[in-house]
Amino acid sequence: MYYFAYYIFLVGITFLFFPSLVLEFSGFPEEADGLARLLGMLITFVSIYYFVASRHEEMRPLWKATVYTRISALFIASALVILEKIRWIILPIVGIEAAAAVWTAIAMHKDSKIYLTSASTRTGFSVDGTKPAG
């Protein structure tokens, strides 16, 4: 989540300060400059939430929710391409984002195994709450 926050921060700053670059690349008209800057501001603010959430274990439900929403973005963007509402050039970017979401899910899974193992070692109880024989 922490590295994702950096990525989102850079995306937000790009939209906020270099909207013409983003608009030209994605095929949107230059008239959307104000909307792109507003979107950049919102994305930058969300990145701050991710920075904070990445440092607090109790925010795990948020991390999990981002996995689902970031993967679903690929399907939504694909549908918008098929409906010719956005250009296909957006798909590789959204695909990278979906791959990063899978990476987050894998990292969370590995981390939960480490957490559960260390908890059973500290308490002397297994994950299911039983005391090991011996």
Image: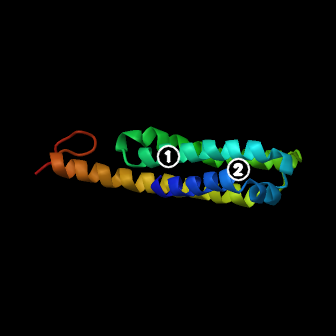
Secondary structure under the numbered disc 1 in the rendered image: helix
Colour setup of the view: rainbow
Percent coordinates x, y for residue 66 in the rendering: 55, 44
Mark 2 vs mark 1: in front: 1
Left of 23 or right of it: where is 99? Answer: left
Q: Nearer the viewer, residue 125 or 57?
A: 57
Check if mark 2's residue and mark 1's residue have beta carbons within 8 Å.
no
Residue at 58 percent of width and 43 percent of height: 68
CA separation in Å, label 2 and label 1:
23 Å
Q: Between 52 and 106, which is closer to the camera in this rendering?
A: 52
x, y percent for residue 17: 67, 54
Left or right: where does residue 115 sit relative to residue 75?
left
- Tell me if residue 87 comes above or below residue 130 in the rendering: below
Identify the amino acid type marked 2: Leu
**Quarter of the rendering containing residue 14:** bottom right
Q: Between 6 and 111, which is closer to the camera in this rendering? A: 6
Q: Residue at x 73, y 61 (%)?
A: 92
Packing grade of label 1 (10 A; few <14, some 14-19, many >=20) is: some
Residue 44, percent across and down? 58, 47
Residue 132, image x, y percentages:
17, 47
> What residue would you read off at disc 2?
74
From the viewer's perspective, is 16 left or right of 44? Answer: right
Q: Which residue is at 53% across, 48% downward?
A: 47
Q: Is residue 111 above or below residue 130?
A: below
Residue that badge 1 annotates: 48
> From this viewpoint, is residue 132 visible?
no
